[in-house]
Image (tube, grey):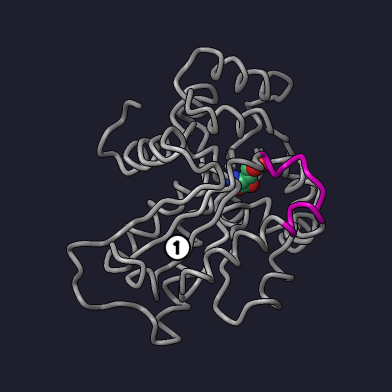
Amino acid sequence: MKENDFKMSIGVFDSGMGGISVLSELIKLMPNENYIYYGDSNNAPYGTKTVEEITKLSINACDFLISKGVKAIVIACNTATSASIKILRNKYSIPIIGMEPAIKPAIEISTDKKIVVLATPITLAEKKFENLVNKLHANEKVIKVPAPELVEIVESGDINSNMVKQQIQHYFCDINMSQVGFVVLGCTHFIFLRDMIQEVIGKEIDLVDGNEGTARHLKDTLLTLGLLIHKNNNDTQVKFFNSIDNDKILNLSKQLFKYITNSNRHI
Ligand code: DGL
């Protein structure tokens, strides 16, 4: 891919590897687009940083993507969205699409059951989350579970070990699961642990995430602006960048991408 070919791609950004799960959903829905992924693994995790720090890092990442000539940016990170989406939208003139923990779909289906939201400490503590829960009148239903350890696990790439299962079990040990109908994955890193989380909570409890909603939001936005590529492109380009610029991290990004797009379940 020549440098010029990046122009009019879709930029996707996350604190590290998590947004690769969103990237996979974007490609499913918009297969004719080209994509540039930027992971800020050098500064991950974001979920335990201050709002000011996260905003600064998010601006750096968006500046990088803008310098490549992208036509839209997906903030594929619930934490960065909570902390800085307003500032980013004010700063840049291209569409900036964020993430939102998928409480709404869970509320629409769930009757009297509780909804566990697994996310980073910042996402759960921010005003944006409180506003969402209030808007949906879900205060009584939502159980917040901060799970920063899972971010580090995904960043290390060691997603299948027994230790991961123990960590997930630990989050749920004090919750009466017979009252729970849904678990919302409110962090894009956790999608890589979906199978193991489902194994721990059991098949009767539904797992939901916001990836598809974000992909639909971007597609609608590009359609409205006349920016969506309709012409069949059998050669979609995906280019990975990371703030840790070495082969190990770029290879892990590609392995996780293959894993999540189902072309290779073992990494
Ligand atoms: N992937 C990010 C999210 O969706 C956060 C991970 C982090 O703490 O860096 O919230």
Residue 236 located left or right of residue 157: left
Q: Residue 174's spot in the image, x, y percent?
A: 74, 20
User: Is residue 205 a member of the stretch shown in magenta?
Assistant: no
Residue 216 located left or right of residue 51: left
Q: Quadrant of residue 175?
A: top right
Q: Nearer the viewer, residue 40 or 82?
A: 40
Q: Nearer the viewer, residue 200 or 12?
A: 12
Residue 223 located left or right of residue 207: left
Q: Is residue 5 visible to the viewer in this orientation of the structure?
A: yes
- Establish if 95 lies above or below 172: below
Q: Secondary structure at mark 1?
A: helix
- Residue at image position (61%, 19%) is 169
- Establish if 39 lies above or below 136: above
Q: Which residues are magenta?
A: 45-56
Count numbered badges in the picture. 1
Image quarter in which the N terminus is found: bottom left
Q: Nearer the viewer, residue 3 or 212?
A: 3
Q: Which residue corresponds to mark 1?
A: 215
Image quarter in which the C terminus is found: top left
Q: Residue 103's spot in the image, x, y percent?
A: 63, 52
Ligand 1 visible in quadrant: top right
Q: Residue 2's spot in the image, x, y percent?
A: 30, 66
Q: Is residue 117 visible to the viewer in this orientation of the structure?
A: no
For badge 1, the amino acid type reads: Ala
Residue 46 located left or right of residue 164: right
Q: Nearer the viewer, residue 101 or 56?
A: 56
